Amino acid sequence: MKKVLVCWIGNTDLKAPTEEEKVGLGPIGQAATHTEYDEIALLTNYPEDATGHYLVWLRARTRAKILVYPEKLSGPTQFGEIYPAAVRAVLDVMGRNGEAIELYFHLSPGTPAMAAVWVILAKTRFPATLIESSLQYGVKVASVPFDISAEFIPDLLAKPDRELLRYSLAAPPEAPEFSDIICRSDVMTRLLEKARRVAPRSVPVLIEGESGTGKELLARAIHRSSTRKDEPFIAVNCGAISTELVESELFGHEKGAFTGAEKSRAGYFEAAGKGTLFLDEIGELPLHAQVKLLRALQENEITRVGSTKPIRTEARIIAATNRNLLQEAASGRFRSDLFYRLAVAILQIPPLRERSGDLGLLVDSLLGQVNRESETEPGYIHKQLSISARNLLLSHPWPGNVRELLNTLRRAAIWAKDEIIDGDDIRDALLPVAFECDSDILDKPLGNGLDLQQVISDVARHYLIRAMKEAHGNKTRAAELVGLPSYQTLTNWLSKYGVNI
């Protein structure tokens, strides 16, 4: 794995070639001679003639490839200019090398504002090791004992503007009931705003999303934020109820209604009372039960199996599915009249791979959950992630979404012998990713949620997996099979597309 140092050129660095007895090698020179880096990326707002002599001097002291990123700043403390300049440089480094690199950000060169930006980036968007150096203490890893919750400084600075816009649009207030849902991505922020809007209402809600995206978590947040929060929340997995018992489970039954009905029993509708009935995996309900459910929603009443007496129901319905119910209805596998009855408010939870900026937050939050869960286990040591382990987690596609991420962290915490979860622990904990490549890959309909980048990713993973299997893990041979120039390039592709074989 390549080691890449990224930093600004500071005034002390420029003095090093001519005043070495006074300033030493300078922060960058110290770092370059202390650790063998594969690449050093230097940002500079100094004129070219001021940096040219320094670069010649530095190249004579390191075998690392040195890249220079000239930036024009109106001032050395302009956060709004420093931040995007730093992001551009890091993105270029990662774009050329792939994500299978170890990033190091040097805090000592440049201004305090530049150092602050490196801290923010290392703690949020680009996990990296922070280093500092001095004449007295040499080079050492910088200890930053706090996390920064914002990912982008522009977002941080724009917060007052966003609040003003939210109030002008009469957006719903922030609800603490949604605080368990960890996110900062735009797509999830919009989703939660919709959920907050619909929470106080009594209309049915349909939550769609892949398995593991947190549909029940969102349903519970809606319930807790509604006027029904003091009433029951009853969760029902429709796919786990046998076809023969589904009506009895939902609507209840009278004594003697069928063999084994030894006493009367209330169903889930009655148990929910004036609260919320959460029907998970509603697409699994058999058609005959869908008919009864539709009537219950239309008439706000149910009838127990074996009875003719209707019972009034005031429960609010929140349904969830990992299927596309509109397509299921079109194919006759789900009643279209029931779909339109449920689909008053539709909330579509995006898969984790589409939640840009959320993954790092979730990794930290879920690892904290794993540590709390394991506190009472004899000899358990609270776990932390190494940079390489974190990079592996951030590059994985997570087809099982948040649930898969949580279980992976649980396994990694078990495999890790010491406090640090390293890259090998994560590789052992990750599940193999199986991708299917559609035979009609060139004939997918435009629109309807087509994601061209995802299609390209699926094709790349498909052929990378095939090549690695056929080459029996030999990367040089696998690179030849897919037309890549070297095994290093193949390694970068494997990391980029989350293939672990």
Image (spheres, grey):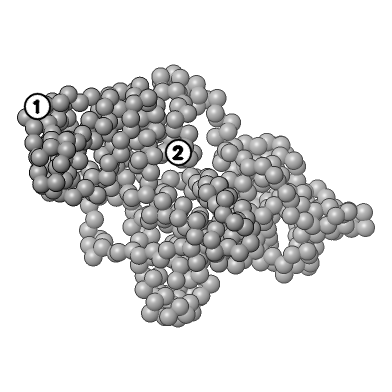
x and y percentages locating residue 114 in the rendered image: 70, 43
Residue at 44%, 66% in the rendered image: 499
Residue type indicated by callout 2: Ile
Residue at 48%, 45% in the rendered image: 358
x and y percentages locating residue 250 in the rendered image: 19, 38
- How crowded pointer 2 is (Cα within 10 Å; few <14, some 14-19, many 20+) is rated as some
Q: Is residue 368 left or right of residue 442?
A: right
x and y percentages locating residue 466 in the rendered image: 36, 73
* Quarter of image, res 457: bottom left
- Vertically, is 444 above or below 334? below
Q: Is residue 63 left or right of residue 334?
A: right
Q: Nearer the viewer, residue 297 or 131?
A: 297
Residue 266 visible: yes
Closer to the N terminus: mark 1 or mark 2? 2
- Vertically, is 152 above or below 94? above
**Residue 140, which numbered label?**
none
Residue at 17%, 35% in the rendered image: 264
Residue at 77%, 49% in the rendered image: 108
Residue type indicated by callout 1: Lys
Secondary element under disc 1, as helix, strand or loop, is loop
Q: Is residue 70 left or right of residue 455?
A: right
Q: Nearer the viewer, residue 392 or 151?
A: 392
Q: Specify the farthest residue to the front.
A: 262
Q: Specify the farthest residue to the left.
A: 308
Residue marked by disc 1? 309
Residue marked by disc 2? 181
- Vertically, is 114 above or below 1? above
Rounded to the nearest angstrom, the CA distance separating label 1 from label 2 is: 42 Å
Residue 67 visible: no
- How crowded pointer 1 is (Cα within 10 Å; few <14, some 14-19, many 20+) is rated as few
Secondary element under disc 2, as helix, strand or loop, is loop
